[in-house]
Image (cartoon, helix red, strand yellow):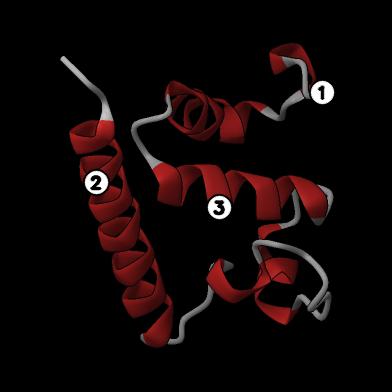
Amino acid sequence: MTRPRDIPRKYRKLYERAMSGRHPRDAIRFQCIECMGYQEGLVEGCTDPHCALYPYRMSRDSSYRARIRSSDAERRKNGAESMQAVPA
């Protein structure tokens, strides 16, 4: 587990947003940056297709935004469906 004091100062705000749970894109971004040893430039060249976040990693590819949006929409839909299944 990452300890905040071990995170380079440059990435601490990103870490806080990621850990808040309200910013899934920031969580993915932070995980990728951390995985690459806090070298942001290496994330785009990630070659680990076995990583669960590989399809969603940061890149300059415009399809990144589309994948995130569809993932967010699916998560919201699944959340709404699960709320309907809960008896009052």
Q: Which mark lies nearer to you, 3 or 2? A: 2
Q: Which residue is drawn at 81% across and 56% down?
A: 36
The answer to which image quadrant residue 68 occupies is bottom left
Query: Type of residue at label 2?
Result: Glu
Position of the C terminus by quadrant: top left
Give the labeled residue for mark 2.
81
Residue 29 is labelled as 3
Q: Looking at the image, do the residues carrying marks 1 and 3 touch, with CB atoms under 8 Å apart? A: no
Q: Which is more N-terminal, label 1 or label 2? A: 1
- Camera-side residue of 74 and 45: 74
Which element type, helix, strand or loop, lies under badge 3? helix
- Above or below: residue 15 compared with residue 52: above
Which quadrant is home to the N terminus?
A: top right
Q: Mark 1 points at which residue?
A: 1
Q: Is mark 2 on a helix, strand or loop?
A: helix
Residue at horizontal 30%, vertical 39%?
A: 82
Q: Is residue 9 above or below residue 60?
A: above
**Cα distance, mark 2 to mark 1?**
32 Å
x then y, percent, for residue 73: 25, 60
Q: Nearer the viewer, residue 17 or 41?
A: 17
Amino acid type shown at disc 1 = Met
Estimate the x, y position of residue 51 in percent, counting from the top left: 77, 65
Which amino acid, mark 3? Answer: Arg
Can you give x and y, in whole percent of width and height, for residue 60 in the image?
46, 81
Q: Which label's residue is closer to the chain start, 3 or 2? A: 3
Mark 2 vs mark 1, foreground winner is: 2
Q: Residue lying farthest front?
A: 87
